[in-house]
Amino acid sequence: MDKKPGLLTVLDAVTIITLLVATWMVFFFAPVEAVMGLVQKVFYFHVASAWVGMLGFLVAAVAGGIYLAKGDRKWDILGLASVEIGLAFTFIATVTGSIWARPIWNTWWTWDPRLTTTTIMLLIYAAYLMLRSGLEDPDRRARFGAVYAIIGFLSVPLTFFSARLFRTIHPVVIGTNQPGAEGSFDMTGDMRLVFFFSLFTFTIIFVDLLWHRVRLGRLQDKVEQLKLRFNA
Amino acid sequence: MSEVHVAKDNPQVVADQRPATRGARSGFLRALSAIVWKDLAAELRSREMLSAMLVFALLVIIIFNFALELDAKTRYSVTSGVLWVTFAFAGTLGLNRSMAMEKDRGCLDGLLLAPVDRSAIYFGKAIGNLIFMLIVEAIVLPVYSVLYNVNLFNPGLILVVLLGSIGYVAVGTLLSSMAVQTRTRDILLPILLFPVIIPVFIAAVKACGGFLQGAPMDEIMPWLNLLIVYDVVFTAVSFMVFDYIVEE
């Protein structure tokens, strides 16, 4: 294992500091929303987690494409790392969303397009991990993972559109709301600042985690190859 | 592709197929129809897959009768859903069987050694699977009509069934050729396939329901468009990535 790069240590520190600042901003800087009250504060980290989830799956699909074209193992390691992080954050977004939905929509869950698409996305990438765990040959595992990451990511927008042809009640905070959306609100300047700072914070967390996970993946790879050589 | 060096290693194959003397397109079509024909002939003799798919499909419909109490009032609103769940379940049986058949006894390796384009193998298997699926659907639909006294002979509905099956089979063939190469094999296929196939499923159920309930065309068109987009996108992508699935 190569030494931990200095830049990564710096990034770790930056991640922790921005996360602390973001948490402080959410609780003490952002104004309390007039109608929904304190529960609205979930929104800042909820949207940021959902964003990181999508980012992770996008990175996985792109890395899959590059892996198929180039055949370099590092793209496979990157793909797996971003799927794992994407899954974790999509799950966080689902849970925080439920916490918000209970008082606002009066239900933990509803079959709204965003919620449906998120669940199906969780299932797709859970299947991705199951597919990988069923394959021993590292080369084949990388190829199949890349193909499934691409197919899965392509189906997500279609799932969203098909679910959206039903009526939605999920509020759209940026852009225009569809009629029937419930629990929407307009952001004040301070709220917007906290919101974008949360997005920024979570993007940094994503990069930091991804870096750590890729290093771990490389180590895993090395161990696997050593094992193969030892057994041969 | 690998045609050239494979052909060099295996003179007999060259003698049989003579790929160099034929035009590329007719070679592709011949390879494709040979694969489809092989699947059909094998099925015609054993009738393993079709009979399993059919009996399973009928069982699912009968179970739904008790699960949903398909009385005359609810019938029209749930029929399309029941039909598509049946097709999806029966479809995975067929897809699994069709690929497992190739994997057992090294048939797939034989196919891959043949000096033909890999995409001919993909399209050949996909068309074979589509034919089996359509046969099952062609039997299930009239049986359902008779059992539940619902008129399913509607050209629009048949179009939806065709479009939905194409999308299902396009992705299903690709994913089943992945699933058979894993340790968990046939239990993995539905887990891989169903989340990716959801758009087809939603669109097909809504479009079928629309035709059955006599909804206006402008309500059904978005679903048909979605099906067509899905079919085109996923057939193209599956065709492009199939090489990486069967590569050794």
Image (cartoon, grey):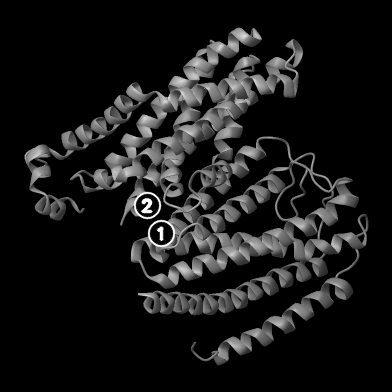
The residue depicted at 56 percent of the width and 89 percent of the height is A7
Say few, some or many: other residues with alpha carbon within 10 Å of mark 1 (under 14 / 14 to 19 / 20 or more). many
Question: Relative to the observer, which residue lies in front, B37 or B43?
Answer: B43
Residue B116 lies, with reference to residue B63, above or below; the image says below
Q: Image quadrant for the C terminus of chain A?
A: bottom left
* Residue assigned mark 2: B245
Residue A218 horizontal/vertical position (percent): 48, 77
Question: Relative to the observer, which residue lies in front, A118 or B2?
Answer: B2
Residue A4 horizontal/vertical position (percent): 55, 89
The residue depicted at 58 percent of the width and 86 percent of the height is A8
Question: Do discs 1 and 2 belong to a common subunit?
Answer: no
Looking at the rendered structure, the secondary structure element under dot 2 is helix
Residue A173 lies, with reference to residue A196, above or below; the image says above
Q: Which chain is indicated by disc 1?
A: A
Left or right: where does residue B87 sit relative to residue A138? right
Looking at the rendered structure, the secondary structure element under dot 1 is helix
Check disc 1 and give the amino acid type.
Answer: Arg
Check disc 2 and give the amino acid type.
Answer: Ile
Left or right: where does residue B179 sit relative to residue B75? left
The residue depicted at 65 percent of the width and 84 percent of the height is A12
Inter-mark Cα distance, 1 to 2: 7 Å
Residue B41 lies, with reference to residue B191, above or below; the image says above
Residue A181 horizontal/vertical position (percent): 79, 43
Say few, some or many: other residues with alpha carbon within 10 Å of mark 2 (under 14 / 14 to 19 / 20 or more). some
Left or right: where does residue A206 sit relative to residue B179? right
* Residue assigned mark 1: A143
